[in-house]
Image: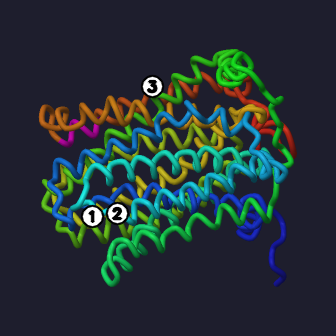
Amino acid sequence: MAARTDGRTWVDGVRPYLERGPVAAFALGVSSGFPYAMIAATLTTRLAQSGIDKKTVTAFSLAFLVYNIKFLWAWVVDGVRLPLLGALGQRVSWLLVAGVLVIAAVANLALVDPRASIGATVTAAILVAVAGSTFDVVIDAYRIEILEPRQLGVGSGMSQYGWRIGSAGAASLALFVAARHGWTAGYLVTAVLALPAILAGLIVGEPRRHRDVEPRRGVGPTLAAIWRPFVQFFARPGAFVVLLFILIHKIGDTLGQLVLRLLLNDTGFTNDEIALYDVGVGFWAYLIGIFAGGVMYARLGLKRSVLISLVLMAVSNASFAALAAAGHSNPGLAGAMTFENIASGIGGVTVVAYFSALCDLRFTAAQYALISAAASVVGRIVTGASAGALVERVGYVNFYLLTVVLAVPGVALFWWMSRSGLVDRSVGSAGTEGPGDARDGAAA
């Protein structure tokens, strides 16, 4: 019997991931994830092994706040043309410069000795954060502009794949090399992970969708270049409602993740069980979720796929309430981690695709930097200060049920935005120029 050819096959689902833009987005994601890993758990391990006290080690987490203020200088990436290298194009030239800055910053962090000077180590970590967040600004702008509107979902998924692999690969590589040749060598060797983004820029070239901002000279025009991207964004109908959604859409999910390890520890799970189910099962479930999110976006379109993903992320926290009620249960942990990570993978693709579509192609770097910073700032500041106190007051079961309730406003707001037409009206030129239209039913 001949194979059926009607409808879409699994090959049709995979093919979009192999197109030029999404493959480049994967390379960009790899490079984006590596500097973050160098100041995250990797640096924590290095400091602990150097005999630095716990209070000082945890204080280094403040370096991550740099990522939340990157929108303050993102306009430079849009509006400042680099001498000489500028001939390669605005995005490619900045991709090269930011990549070199990240390599230099990581090399500097590799060469400092925390035991000799904790101050120099703090400065080096902050420099990595500044260079890494600037690299992120350029990478996000380049990713959005090389993708066509129909590719935003798949491209976001490939970028998420790359980020996970880049961050995990950098951390693992640094630990492996450091165990044999010391931390300086461990950090230096990871600098090679900046190359995928640089090579993607040189091979793909300047994005066809990029729109150059007019050159600005003098104090007045320069100040205008700083505020113009934000004025353009907030001049859209319902912009402040969209911003409210960006701010609140992940509060429940962020709260739940903040205390997950505390739940697992208090429930009696061993390190081996956590490694197997949280890190192992969770990692592969997340990758599955990313693929599912790309397919969902392509087939259902922006509005339906985002709404479904928001519901899934909200409900997934209920699985941790069930785990807390059940106690120490390996099948329960495996199920909760599978559900949570698939939902997070789907949401990471569809929501990032929507946020990408919000940008104006003249100000992609500045506007996406503002959006991505706003998406995480509430979770990091507000929920981080309240999560532990809430658990102590109401217990884990009620805490996780509360996170489900806290996710409802974000779901309800997006549903209203979709029904009222605000989602379509909020989409910028990044979601409309080129094949496909983020405002249409299906993106493909």
Q: Is residue 2 something that shows in the picture? A: yes
Residue displayed at 57% across by 54% down: 101
Q: Residues within 10 Å of mark 1 (few under 14, many from 20)?
A: few
Distance from the alpha carbon under mark 1 to that under mark 3: 38 Å
The answer to the question of whether label 1 and label 3 lie on touching residues, with beta carbons closer than 8 A, is: no
Q: Amino acid at mark 1?
A: Thr
* Residue to which mark 2 is pinned: 42
Which residue is denoted by mark 3 in the rendering? 409
> Of residues 352 and 92, which is closer to you in this image?
92
Mark in front: 1 vs 3:
1
For label 1, the SS is helix
Marks 2/1 in contact by CB < 8 Å: the verdict is yes
Compare marks 2 and 3 and give the one earlier in the sequence: 2
User: Label 2 neighbourhood size at 10 Å, few (<14), some (14-19), many (20+)?
Assistant: some
* Residue 429 locus on image (x, y percent): 79, 33
User: Which range is magenta?
Assistant: 396-401
Query: Toward which corner of the image does residue 45 lie, by quadrant?
Result: bottom left
Tell me which numbered mark, 1 or 3, is placed earlier along the sequence: 1
Instruction: Check whether the beta carbons of the residues at disc 2 and disc 3 lie within 8 A of each other.
Output: no
339 vs 93, left or right, is left
Residue 245 against residue 159 in the figure, above or below: above
Q: Residue at x 27, y 40 (%)?
A: 400
Residue at the spot x=30%, y=48% of the render?
60
Which residue is under mark 1?
A: 45
Q: Is residue 140 above or below residue 211?
A: below
